[in-house]
Amino acid sequence: MRIGALTKLLEVANAPYDRLADLKKKKRIIGSTLADVPEELIYAAGLHPFLILGTNNPIRYSAALLPDNSCSLARSNLELVVGYQGDFFDGFILSQVCDTTQHLCDIWKRKFSDHYFENFLAPRQVARPSARDWYAQECRRLRKELGKYTGKEITDDDLWRSFRIYNENRALLRKLYDIKREVPALMTNREFFDLVKATFFMDKEEHNRLLREVLDWAEQQKGHLQGQEGYFKLIIAGIVVEPPNIYDLIDEVKGNIVGDNLCSASRYIYHDVPLEGDPAEALAERHVRKPHFSPINSDVERIYKDLLELYREKGAETIFYIHIKYCESQDYDLPDIKVRMRQEGIPLLELETEYQTTHLAQMKTRLQAFCESVLGRM
Ligand code: SF4
């Protein structure tokens, strides 16, 4: 039986704009896009950071603004603000991580010329000695610009408080992930990843409060539930899992997601901001320690090395790779990943997805066939 805190988190994850209407009355809302915008700075400025994760609703406008071969994530992000929820946001901070996001930023800025707008330029080759300095400088610049926007300087105390709240949030999510991994009957994959998704939308302190309740409940429940029997362990790789019904398909075949490298999950919740030294350097330290992400990495071989490590460390049986249609970074990575996994004898299922493909019958058939023929699960 679900507890109230869990139900509330799932509601926010699935209908954030309806559920957070009250928040909009209290704070100005700053939308950001994946990946690596330091939300802690936005929070410290007294604004509400909201991660834009696209829409599954029909595309009506963005097809006319972006080239046909732009990725489904960029297209659906732009559609969300142009076609559906533009009024929800007071400003935007957009991250440039690839050619698509570079063009997207220009179009977005022109479309919302009356809104607060910043580009955030995270270094993409994080092993370079200059990367850490670059990221810290970007954080200092953003801190100053946010201060100008609100008319109030962001103090170091504001920042340390924000870092503590965000670190607590990540720690709570990691703890819950550990329990869910060991006791998959506690909650479905869809529930767990929705619960993570809610953190991108709602007030962090509120999310922390509800998460603490869910964790207490999970600790009480875990002893009464069966362990791993009947489930198979898998790793989910990619950037985002959309539409989220893909998690439902994995739940139906009793897959237990024991690890991931998603921007919308582990890349967000792993590694805290150190609580000492210069605040901008502390944010940069976290940035360079983050797990691999297709367009931002320290070594091209990490594309598959990190995945292999995760697969072995978690004792998984297979990897499901979620490929966003027309993602240029994933298009480059995928051939290498496939070759390496084949060499290692690791079963890998590639699932190509689009935000607007919500009828998943074909994917369901492929997934079931893979589980039967490759994993031997009937
Ligand atoms: S990294 Fe891929 S999914 Fe993300 S914006 Fe660029 S092309 Fe789209």
Image (tube, grey):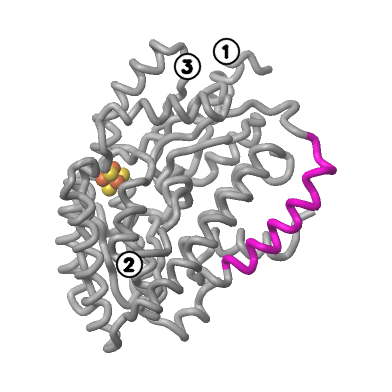
Can you tell me whether the CB of the residue at mark 2 lies under 8 Å from the nearest atom of ligand 1? no
Q: Farthest residue toward the front? A: 277
Measured Cα–Cα span from mark 3 to mark 2: 42 Å
- Circle 1 is placed at which residue position? 373
Is 229 displayed left or right of 151 in the figure?
A: right
Asked where in the image residue 207 lies, by quadrant, the reply is bottom right
Q: Residue at x 60, y 28 (%)?
A: 233
Q: Residue at x 53, y 33 (%)?
A: 361
261 versus 45 height, above or below: above
- Circle 2 is placed at which residue position? 279
Quick check: which quadrant has ligand 1? top left
Is 274 displayed left or right of 254 in the figure?
A: left
Q: Is residue 336 magenta?
A: no
335 versus 352 height, above or below: above
Can you tell me whether the CB of the residue at mark 3 lies under 8 Å from the nearest atom of ligand 1? no
- Neighbourhood count class around disc 3 (C-alpha, 10 Å): few under 14, some 14–19, many 20 upward: some
Q: Amino acid at mark 1?
A: Ser
- Of mark 1 and mark 3, the one earlier in the sequence is 3
x and y percent of residue 320 in the render?
48, 29
Q: Amino acid at mark 2?
A: Pro
Measured Cα–Cα span from mark 1 to mark 3: 14 Å
Q: Residue at x 50, y 77 (%)?
A: 21
- Circle 3 is placed at which residue position? 346
Secondary structure beneath dot 2 equals helix
x and y percent of residue 239 in the render?
38, 42
Q: Amino acid at mark 3?
A: Ile
Q: Nearer the viewer, residue 58 or 96?
A: 96
Secondary structure beneath dot 1 equals helix
- Of mark 3 and mark 2, the one earlier in the sequence is 2
- Neighbourhood count class around disc 2 (C-alpha, 10 Å): few under 14, some 14–19, many 20 upward: many
Is 275 displayed left or right of 250 in the figure?
A: left
First to last magenta residue range = 207-226
